[in-house]
Amino acid sequence: MATTLVICEKPDAARRIAESLSDGSQVLRHSKKGVPIYEVVRPGEKIFICSARGHLYSVDQKRGATRRAYPIWDLTWKPRYLTERGQERLQTWIEQIYEVSREADCFVNACDYDIEGSLIGTTILRYACKGADRNAKRMKFSTLTRRELQEAYANSTLKLDLTLTNAGMCRHEVDWIYGVNLSRVLTDSAREHGRIYSTLSTGRVQGPTLRFVVDREEQINCFVPVPYWVIEAIIKADDSLISAQYEKERVSSKSAAERVVLECSGKAGRITDVESYRSKIPPPTPFDLSTLQAEAYRHFGLRPSYTLATAERLYLDALISYPRTSSQKLPPGIEYRKILENLSTLEEYGAKVSRILKLPRLSPHEGERVDPAHPAIYPTGSIPHRRLEQRERKVYDLVVRRFMATFGEPAVKQSEKATVSVEGHIFYLRGIRILTKGWMDLYEPYSHFEEVLLPALSIGEIVNITHIASIDKFTQPPPRFNPGSLLKLMEDQNIGTKATRADIIETLYSRGYIVGERMTPTPLALNVIEVLKRYCPNVIDTSLTRELEEMMQDIESGRDQRESVLIEAINHLRPVMAELEARASEVGTELGKTIRETRLAQITLLSPCPQCSSKLIIIRNRRTGKRFIGCTGRWEKSCTFSLPLPQFGTLTLLRKFCSQCGFQLVQVKARGRRSMISCSMCFLKKRHRQATAQT
Amino acid sequence: MSKTCSLCQRKAALSSDFCETHKIAESNVKAGYKEWARAFDGDISMKNYLECIINLPETGEKAKEVARHLLKK
């Protein structure tokens, strides 16, 4: 009997693949040292299905170098438990996969069909299964539905997708070389010359992304508003009061605006033209990952990384197709009708789906983007077998309604424009109404259109200006990025991949480079970018990252070799490292100063000392280890003011103030507990009151 | 020894009293005055203009620092 070993990317996917391949027969689940391995017996074949836990192998430096050494150009692939702290459990995982592989004579990579999936599967087959990648097969699927998995297994390709694997390996290697070398030189310079230790990181994609945020902040900081005036007018026509637009959206001089108001105030006008035209609004295109992330952020305020994680959970439950896709196409092979029929069994979609099914032809409105590996994101039609969490429900609903909307008919809107002449000045009355809702009805509540209705107007009709005023306005600075808009910019600039962009943004937060939903760079970020701009502008320039990105895409399509791209990347980085090493003293001093300022700012309260007006800071007693708020005026002014603080959890000084006493609030986050916001001043007063009452 | 910015401790840009960022802010403040003068038909002094932009929430922090610096001169 032949024995096959199928490698999956995640334990949930392994379970689902095992259930699908079992053909109704029993699925045996062996838990070997906590590693789940499924066994399925089919006529003439025994199949073991095991899974990875993300990457089991990663890039690391070759033996001999310390963890602080740089520059490092020699690298190798090692088990992740040797390269990352906290991954010790992966050793057992790899050992168990090896044990099962010894029984197998046929191997299948069933990881997600993309760069990362191919890389995860191939490295396991190559290293854990001792060279099994040479004759392994590849399963290709976009959903975890039983039918598709069975077909994918039956039609496995006889070879692994080595171009995808090489592109993946190259991406990891280039990112490692950039990230490790640059981060180490910055961290070490600050430690050596700035005399302070802090992990400073930058990378091939992280640097340019942070630069977007820093550059935007610079534009905002240097912005000077310019005044302009808007003419606000209300016209009475046919007993209706209608808001009118002046011919110039902005009037750039005060006197000109005042003149318009003076000349038109209380005057009558004549309608000189009435236009009306119909236009179609095409349905939206199916979701690729970026548009799903942008839409989820717009409607639910979900960060891109959360949307991706939620979509992946829905994919593992076989509710939606593979989410890491850049395609906006829905091939007919996915069987639109069947999916819609299944969705119609869900109460919330039933009525709308039945309307779609009555259409003469089911044809989705597809976008331009193509992904050779996967179609756009679509619901599989499978019914949720468990109660979805709130976030999952939202994303699922969005995906389903978007899918339905793509089959809808175009919406038809009627735009109307009446031109009114008043004392030589032109005003416009604009109306817009939806004649046919089409897809908008299917996409509700995510489609929103505000109608403005105009009464029947005719040329020559006399109308009166009942109100006119000039409103003072100022030009506005550009808006700060939010996770959605930054992700969009990264995509437009072609830096990072659909799978990594959201993580890069999260890294910027976790490294303390940016804060807030409206991204504001911290002083540390401003300084790191300034240093990089001065000494190695290439590293934070999008063009270099984009160039490398294109080269890696060439590996994917077989037009370039992994080795040549790696050499090219190293050649770019060598002079940069040399420059940074030569200037280590200046770089380190500058960074050290900023790190110190940042740390001080993190523990300095905005509320001053109520006794001596000096700054208050968080102090930890070296002897007892207890923390409290103390006054910096202790030595100069002998001020002994202090306030208590919670002793457990991570403290954050909020930019919010107590509604009772106006003192700055403190947030405490402890593992496994809900975060708590408290006011130290109110706490102290309460304690005093309690003490007084007791005595 | 290299010159430092009049408003912060950073290195001053070439042939300027300001660092790169404050230099951009200065250029924006100066260009802004021309636009403000046009908007008010020349009926605004540099002093009034600087006072106005310092009090506007839309004005960037660096631009405000430059405006305050120019007012003191």
Image: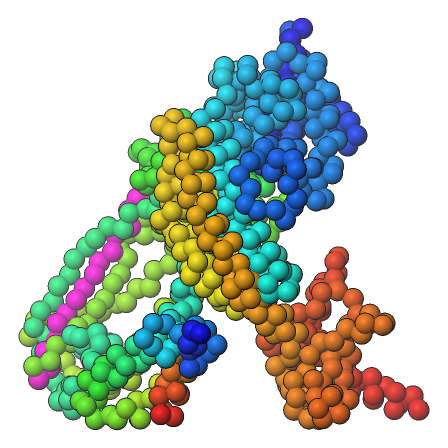
Q: Name the residue: 10% across, 74% down.
A: A271
Residue A115, given in percent of the width and then of the height, sits at: 49, 33
Residue A325, given in percent of the width and then of the height, sits at: 44, 38
User: On the rendered structure, is A35 left or right of A606?
Assistant: right
Q: Is residue A100 above or below residue A416?
A: above
User: On the rendered structure, is A63 left or right of A162?
Assistant: right
Q: Name the residue: 55% across, 14% down.
A: A135
Examine the structure image and report whether residue A74 is included in the region drawn in magenta: no
Residue A688, given in percent of the width and then of the height, sits at: 83, 88
Q: Quadrant of the C terminus of chain B?
A: bottom left
Q: Is residue A158 above or below residue A332?
A: above
**Image color mode:** rainbow
**Residue A664 appears in the picture as rendered:** yes
Q: Name the residue: 52% across, 62% down.
A: A587
User: On the rendered structure, is A204 left or right of A146?
Assistant: left
Q: Name the residue: 45% across, 45% down.
A: A573
Residue numbers of the magenta segment: A399-423
Q: Quadrant of the N terminus of chain B?
A: bottom left
**Residue A386 appears in the picture as rendered:** no
Q: Is residue B65 above or below residue A300?
A: below
Nearer to me, A108 or A168: A168
